[in-house]
Image (cartoon, helix red, strand yellow):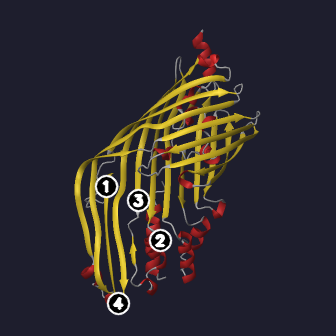
Amino acid sequence: MTTRARILVLAFTFLASLPLTTAYAFNPVQARDISMGMTSAADAIGVRVVGQNPAFLALSDQPGITVSLPVLSMGFRFGNNAFSNTDISDYFQDGKYWTTGDQEYLAGRVAGDELSFTSDIWMRLIGVSFPAKYLDIAFTYDMGMSVDADIDEDLTDLLLLGNSLDDLGERKSFNNTDFSSILLSRIGVTFAKSFNYAEEVTWLDELTAGVTFNYFIGHSFFDIVNMEGDLLTEQGNTSSHAYFEVVGAGQLSSNEEDDFYGDSFVAGGGVGIDLGVGGKILEGRGTVGLSIINLVNQMSWTDGRRAVYGYDLDGIQLSGMNNDDFFEENFNPVDSLLSESEDLNTELPRLFKLDGAYLLNDRITLTTGLAFQFTDAIGSDAFVRWGTGVEYRTLDWLALRGGLSFGGRSGFAFGTGFGLRFGFWQTDIGFGWERGMFNAAKGIRFGMNTVFVFDAMSNSEVNTVSDK
């Protein structure tokens, strides 16, 4: 493969994965979830329950006050369906020149499927939770970004293998290429309350309910809503056409001459509501909960823009490609801004979650969880995911964790990590691998969460005081 062609492949791959990034982005990159198979919700404390199940905030074993600060709570994930970590290291780094065998190997990794990239990034800027007389309350401010990209199989083959004599007379289609991304902030207030109905049900030790009201600030989104393209190579000439319609909003570019991207960092807004119920069972050793994340999930963009881009190359004589003015004479770009300042509406992912945890003994906790996203949304496709995890508290200040999940945006995922606690300081670190393990994995995850926990008065103590 020529140096120019190889640079094009690397550039395309880099651009597709650059953001390292849905309201869904707020959860899969948190350290405890990463290390416990996406099932830490029923074992979460304080501000960590936000975005998981708000009802868990009112359980009696929750601490008094928790505080999360910026930079100390963040994470990311990146995954694809074709190339392992070893492949990326061996073929996309260190200036390696691809032989014909290398090209065929890489193309074989994608054979029969689209090349897909998904990514999420998350940061908690501030968070605080505390028990009050009648309700347990939490305030949070997060930022998250997600990207979802699919590259048509024919286009992937062209990027990896180039065009050869074997392709003469065969029309390659690029119609199934898609790309979407979203960047937003979430300001949330959570209210949770415990109820005494559990006394009437012998197997239920506690019953709680909670709601989170979110205001979403839309910073940017981008979506290819339609794409048509093809390439036909015949003896001595080639023809290629591509047209794609895009919609977007927000400050996605600093180029003042760009006529598509907006110039505002606040380009949209929306309201979201999370609902949850939770409880304690099995003499308080088990925790269960059902939640709906983004029950209300509409985003409105007031600075939306819609445009069509593309090109036409008709009957190009390949013998002329060495001429300096070849592309100026034959490349016919299409660049049309269809509308600006358009009102656009998008949906955030609506997630249904069933979570559970069981305290096996003083040192071991088992967790499990089932999640459903029934419809596609910007930055995230529909999925079903089940996972399980375990936490082993080897010392009072050290907890070791591990977990597996199946399904979701990443298929099979394996995670591990640890938690540290020194006085009021708690830090969790999580590492994860997708579609495989370690160097054979086709994706990575990393998360760090730090929470200050003050146990001066727990939920149960506040409730006792309020009952007097």
Three-letter amino acid code at disc 2? Leu
Tell me the tag on residue 236. Answer: 4
- Decide if residue 458 is in sight here: no
Residue 89 at x, y percent in the picture = 59, 69
Q: Say few, some or many: other residues with alpha carbon within 10 Å of mark 4 (under 14 / 14 to 19 / 20 or more).
A: few
- Marks 4 and 1: in contact by CB < 8 Å? no
Three-letter amino acid code at disc 3? Phe
- Marks 2 and 1: in contact by CB < 8 Å? no
Tell me the tag on residue 10. Answer: 2
Three-letter amino acid code at disc 1? Val
Mark 1 or mark 4: name the one nearer the start of the chain: 4
Mark 3 or mark 2: name the one nearer the start of the chain: 2
* Residue at the disc numbered 1: 247
Name which residue lies at 65% across and 23% down.
204
Residue 139 or residue 209, whichever sits in front: 209
Mark 4 or mark 2: name the one nearer the start of the chain: 2
Residue 188 at x, y percent in the picture = 45, 34
